[in-house]
Amino acid sequence: MRVWKLLGVAGLAGVAATGAIVARDHRRRAQLGPDQVRERLHRRVQELQAADPGGRSGGSGSAGSTDSSARA
């Protein structure tokens, strides 16, 4: 019975830690203005393009595409 109690306490601690991390990230994102978000996104795209100069990752028809014809 003790093992189950320990697992339950460990699970609760994990949930609490995850919630704290999510809340911290949410607060950090909420403080950014639209221009800052746009600048960060542009910087991330440039970093990805520099890492993959051939452009093989991304583009239309990629796995993350939201195009409805890609779900057929």
Image (tube, grey):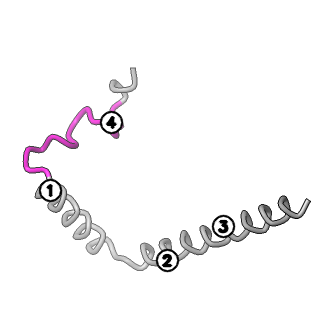
Residue receiving disc 2: 27
Pick whichever of labels 2 and 3 is earlier in the sequence.
3
Check the picture and name the quadrant holding the C terminus. Answer: top left
Residue at image coords 42%, 73%: 29
Q: Nearer the viewer, residue 26 or 38?
A: 26
Task: Point out the stretch of residues depicted in magenta.
Answer: 52-67
| Prevailing secondary structure class for the magenta stretch in the rendered image | loop
Q: Tell whether 50 sits left or right of 13.
A: left
Marking on residue 14: 3
Q: Nearer the viewer, residue 50 or 29?
A: 50
Residue receiving disc 1: 51
Check the picture and name the quadrant holding the N terminus. Answer: bottom right
Crowding around mark 4 (Cα neighbors within 10 Å: few <14, some 14 to 19, many 20+) is few
Which residue in the rendered view is the most extreme toward the right? 1
Marking on residue 36: none
The Cα atoms of the two marked residues, 2 and 1, are separated by: 30 Å
Which residue in the rendered view is the most extreme toward the top? 72
Pick whichever of labels 2 and 4 is earlier in the sequence.
2
Pick whichever of labels 3 and 1 is earlier in the sequence.
3
Q: Nearer the viewer, residue 4 or 58?
A: 4
